[in-house]
Amino acid sequence: MIKTKAIYIRKNSSAKQLKIEDGDELKLPTGKEMIIQVKYSGINFADIMMRLGLYQDAPPKPYIPGYEVSGVVTHIGAEVKDFQVGDQVLAGTKFGGYSSHVKVLPYQVIKIPSHLSLEEAAALPVNFITSYLCLDEIGRLRRGDRVVIDCATGGVGSIALQILRHLEIETIGLTGNSSKFPAIEKYGAKAMTREEFEKSPVKKEYKFILNSSGSKKEVKDQLSRLQLGGHLLCLGLSSAISDGKKSIPKLIKTLLTVPKLSLFDFMLGNITMSGLNALTYFDDHKWVEKSMVKMKEYDFLKPNIHQSFPAANISEAHRELETGKATGKVLLKWS
């Protein structure tokens, strides 16, 4: 048995509740199972949403959040062929990532590419999988398209901007604060504040817009800017959070003011609007394996790390992300 440390969500509350506790003891792996001693765990905005009770797919409490880790393989089952003890790896997890050790299967894991550190590797799985889904699987983007990314300074945004630059696609990256412009411009995208974008002349010139706020005002404005055959993809509800807290008035307003569009709006406008919950893709083992292979092929990606916090400072790490201070990925460091 292997003793573990972990961070649990026990109630829907503020970041102050989070702390390191004794976790479950892990049995030694059998068959194709592997155990990773975690060095870094990735923190995602979905972790904030579930802690606040705004994430429908969260498991019953108490549970360990976390979708991605990097670390070292310490134990392998008898049927594991492509990995060995001592390998430095990254892995995608469906919960459980805020832990000193995780038990995984080979389809969830790849060896860390030589151009990435252990720290950078932990910042890649969720951001890559989400970006790959949005831009490639769903968006089907190609050279000559024009794109807007409204979460451009976050973890997903920074990876999306790198992929779009690689594809030679003209991109506008949005942020709430002009001080974050350099974090967008370094990837070759044009930086604008959301306010500047909303005040700019409405031209139907964008093939694809990625929206993370769910705000009625922003969604309606962005739909009006799509070209024929354009696509607005929504993947978040950040407008329901205020200063890192669940805002009931803002939540109610967001839910009640989501644009009500009919089939004819899309048919006559020749546009598409869709949503994405990347977590559900983790139930498809073949798709996860495919995306992990793709991750290795995209060897030009370099995650933007905002800060790595000691795991004991988990509350501070959540606050850094939920209050909008982060420019890039926020991580937990276990050892």
Image (cartoon, rainbow, N blue to C red):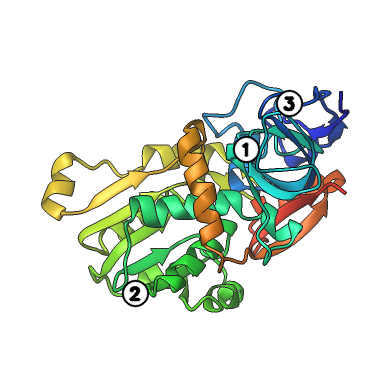
Depth check, mark 2 against mark 1: the one in front is: 1
Badge 1 local density, few (<14 within 10 Å), some, or many (20+)?
some
Q: Quadrant of the N terminus?
A: top right
Residue 64 in which image quadrant: top right
Q: Mark number for residue 106?
A: 1
- Measured Cα–Cα span from mark 3 to mark 2: 45 Å
Whole-percent x and y of residue 150?
46, 61
Q: Amino acid at mark 3?
A: Arg
| Nearer-the-camera pick, 204 or 69 | 69
- Measured Cα–Cα span from mark 2 to mark 1: 48 Å
Q: Is residue 97 left or right of residue 282?
A: right
For marks 3 and 1 on the same chain, the one whose residue lies earlier in the sequence: 3
Task: Tell me the residue at 42%/72% (across/down).
Answer: 172
Residue 314 in which image quadrant: top right
Task: Tell me the residue at 65%/35% (across/down).
Answer: 51
- Measured Cα–Cα span from mark 3 to mark 1: 30 Å
Secondary structure under the numbered disc 3 in the rendered image: loop
The answer to whether residue 317 is above or below residue 163 is above
The answer to whether residue 225 is above or below residue 75 is below
Contact flag, marks 3 and 2 (Cβ < 8 Å) = no
For marks 3 and 2 on the same chain, the one whose residue lies earlier in the sequence: 3
Q: Amino acid at mark 1?
A: Pro
| Nearer-the-camera pick, 280 or 183 | 280
Secondary structure under the numbered disc 1 in the rendered image: helix
Task: Tell me the residue at 31%/66% (across/down).
Answer: 142
Q: Is residue 50 left or right of residue 280?
A: right
Q: Mark number for residue 200?
A: 2
Q: Mark number for residue 10?
A: 3
Badge 3 local density, few (<14 within 10 Å), some, or many (20+)?
some
For marks 2 and 1 on the same chain, the one whose residue lies earlier in the sequence: 1
